[in-house]
Image: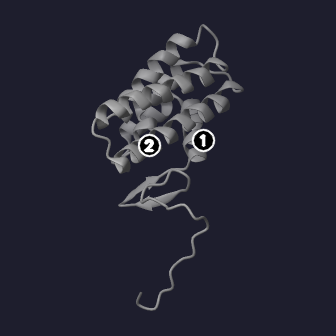
């Protein structure tokens, strides 16, 4: 329209206005890719409380996504992961966050009559999948801190 050719699509599946697979600007905010989420969580976990203190002192910055809030980062640091555990943990949690938003989008698109119940049920299944993945990474001593992390993460994702 107006002399601008339509951009060719790289795949036959439809693209939504919200994508978690690329770094894009949308209505003044950034939607992060799965890899950038994992990288950001890893960086924030390594920086630890210094980043939280600087964030509090810094002028108003763009709002972080809920899975990168200060509370979630503090809970991740409390797990005390090794350098080998952190990337694997970030992959598992990044997959959960991506699957969670994809599930929400799909349920809303279908328009299930009991949306809240459907979302809760499907979220529980995703959390069990995340638990299975994290169970292979963390030690028994780290598990209680992970449970706290999971509560904070899930609370941040819920509207």
Of residues 53 and 38, the one drawn nearer to the viewer in this rendering: 38
Q: Is residue 144 visible?
A: yes
Q: Position of residue 20 (x, y in %)?
A: 51, 50
- Taking 84 as reference, is 3 left or right? left
Query: On screen, 72 above or below 115?
Result: above
The answer to whether residue 132 is left or right of residue 84 is: left
Front residue of this view, candidates 98 and 9: 9
Upstream in the sequence, badge 2 or badge 1?
1
Residue 95 higher or lower than 105, as above or below: above
* Residues packed near mark 2 inside 10 Å, few (<14), some (14 to 19) or many (20 plus): some
How far across and how far down the image is residue 126, in percent?
50, 30
Provide residue 69's location: percent of width, then percent of height.
41, 35
Residue ID for mark 1? 39
Name the residue carrying label 2: 101
| Mark pair 2, 1: CA separation | 19 Å
Question: Tag 2's secondary structure?
Answer: helix
Q: Position of residue 79 (x, y in %)?
A: 55, 18
Among all residues in the image, which is located at the extreme front?
Answer: 113
| Residue 61 appears in the figure | no
Looking at the rendered image, the quarter that the N terminus falls into is bottom left
Identify the residue at horizontal 46%, vertical 52% (top origin): 31
Please tell me which residue is depicted at 32% across the width and 30% down the height of the picture.
Answer: 117
């Amino acid at each position: 329209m107006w002399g601008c050719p339509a951009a060719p699509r790289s795949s036959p599946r439809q693209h939504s206005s919200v994508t978690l697979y690329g770094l894009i600007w949308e209505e003044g905010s950034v939607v992060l890719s799965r890899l950038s989420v994992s990288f950001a969580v890893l960086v924030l976990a390594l920086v630890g409380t210094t980043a939280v203190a600087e964030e509090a002192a810094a002028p108003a910055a763009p709002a972080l996504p809920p899975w990168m809030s200060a509370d979630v980062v503090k809970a991740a640091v409390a797990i005390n992961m090794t350098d080998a555990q952190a990337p694997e943990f970030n992959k598992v949690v990044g997959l959960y966050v991506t699957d969670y938003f994809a599930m929400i989008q799909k349920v809303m698109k279908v328009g299930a009559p009991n949306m809240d119940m459907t979302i809760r049920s499907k979220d529980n299944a995703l959390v069990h999948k995340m638990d299975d993945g994290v169970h292979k990474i963390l030690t028994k001593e780290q598990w209680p801190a992970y449970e706290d992390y999971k509560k904070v993460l899930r609370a941040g994702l819920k509207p």
